[in-house]
Amino acid sequence: MKRIIGILLAAILIIPSLTGAFAVEKSAGLAEDKIIKIVGALEIMQGDENGNLNLEKEVTRAEFVKMAISASQYKDEADVKPPYSIFPDVQSSHWASGYIKTAVSSGLVNGYLDGTFRPSGYVKLEEAVTVTLKLLGYSDSDFTGSYPDGQISKYRSLKIDTNISAKTGDILTRRECMYLLYNALCTYTKSGKGYGETLGYTADKYGNIDYLALMEKDKEGPYIVSGDDWIAKLGFDAADTEYYTDSKKVSQDVIKDNDVIYWSNSFKTVWVYSDKVTGVLEGISPNPASPSAVTVAGNSYDIETEQAKVAFGGKGSFEIGDTVTILLGESGIVAAKNPETVSDEFFGLSTSVERKEYTYGGKTYSDYYVNVSSFDGKTHSIKTEDPDFQTGILVRVNYSGGEMTAKPYSQKYNSVNDLILAVKEDRIAENAVIVDYFGKSYVTTYPARLKEISINAQNVAYYNINSNGFVDYLLLKDATGDCHSYGVIFKYKGNTSFLTSSKNSSISNYSNLSSGVVKVKYDGNEADNISWLPEMTIDSIDNGKVNFLGKTYKVWDYAECFVLEQKTYSANKSSDKSMSEIIEQVSFDRIDTILKGDEYTVMGYYDNTGIIRVLVAQKNF
């Protein structure tokens, strides 16, 4: 975001930190649909009886006063109509009399010299600006010269004119009033505080009203889905609604029985939680008489609702030793159910097997559990009769018949031509799950990435094409190479290090390794396979791609970049240089800058998928 230096310095003198502070400029403003939802949630501006906002409609003085009071600290004082007439043309029975009285008593507005207010007259830019500046703490004495030149000048210098084209004397539309008051909420007051902050609102990192924080305050629920009953619960049109699960926008049709939903009327948004855990109830904390958390299948979960407390409390439905399915919401258990009433299935990777013990009624119970990492980022602990359950493999988890089971999954395809054609024709569902895995690691990938790799029957573990002909689920077996670590093996004074930005960097289970640029495959945290990458000399990078010997190579979005100040990837024990003086991990921008000079030769290292994973700028000698 651009900022005028003088304003920035002044703000620094007033405000200790701008992190999470409101913006002086609105150059990174929200999209209009988000602003509409914000001013609606704050009750500054709402639609008519049919929900229409009529943004091009001109605004009366009474209507603007209501908007301004609703955007002020006085909003709770305006509900009661006064027992007397405020102005000759504003009777106590007037719909806006309470707002006008509050605006007058707080010094925000005045009547005309003839003693009238003219509530049905249209509000002009300078009138609305004057009221808005008073909300920000300015008074008439802060402006010199003739009215309204000083007010309009301040309005523009504060940048609260963003998205407003009206000039002095122009009548404002509802859209322009909306922007004026929204911009004011994101602006500093005369005393240097964020105006929205003085009203109890927070800012996002761009200085706008925090949209997500407002939605949290307006959120209702939880509610457990059963058929279509949840639609009537919303109180607004389910078809004209945004749906989210795991912070990702999804479609309405993902909602199924036993999902937990929350919703916001003001923002017409629904949040969907599908987490379920089935296992033995091993503990109730602090005790069954007053449960606040339970342990199921080895993991502890807080209780979110009274309904769940009843299920685990005193003479509830479940006691320690029972098998139970818990439905998880935003912050804990929403409900506890008999597993026979819940069905579901999902894929994941087996990561470990462990033996767990728990005691109840003086008796110790012992079971084996396989831990499964599902492709939504969650871990499930599932009872198994096999203490040697293989780890690092694809498993299919199923809820049925009152129990949760995990079984190895190894589908073999003779042909995946229908999948290849769907990818070629961009027939990928909007909310498709696309995952590439190796061992105990996986990455979520995106449709465009599929066109950059070779898809065949050997590297497809599972896929599904829905009734509309779109791919909605795809599991790949090490097809993209994106879940591996890339970098440089460097030998420094007898010690070998793997230089990479990946979270996996240990190669301690390998010895006598050659130095150089490598790909390391990990099974969990342990290096499983190391291979050295072929190289090419790079003269330029254009739109993330390079040409070499007649072939085009794409540079990986997360390419590892280094500057090497010598010819080799090692330094002997007699070296007087630190490792950072010999090789430095740098940004892609640094490599791009180096390419424009002649002091270094830039080498690109690629894998078998044809993607350049590592870039090394090596000093010329």
Image (cartoon, rainbow, N blue to C red):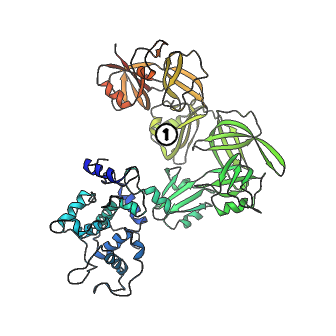
Eyeballing the image, is 490 above or below 589?
A: above
Eyeballing the image, is 563 above or below 280?
A: above
Res. 262 image quadrant: bottom right
Is 288 on the left or on the right of 578, as rendered? right
Is 614 on the left or on the right of 162, as rendered? right
Eyeballing the image, is 8 above or below 454?
A: below
List the single residue furthest toward the right: 362
Residue marked by disc 1: 422
- The percent position of residue 534, horizontal first and vertical second, equals 46, 19
Eyeballing the image, is 504 above or below 8?
A: above
**Residue sitting at x 32%, y 25%:** 594
Res. 33 image quadrant: bottom left
Is 546 on the left or on the right of 528, as rendered? left
Is any part of residue 580 visible from this angle? yes
- The percent position of residue 43, horizontal first and vertical second, equals 41, 68
- The percent position of residue 436, horizontal first and vertical second, equals 54, 35
Residue nearer the viewer, 230 or 577: 577
Mark 1 crowd level (few <14, some 14–19, many ≥20, 10 Å Cα) = some
What is the secondary structure assignment of the residue under circle 1?
helix
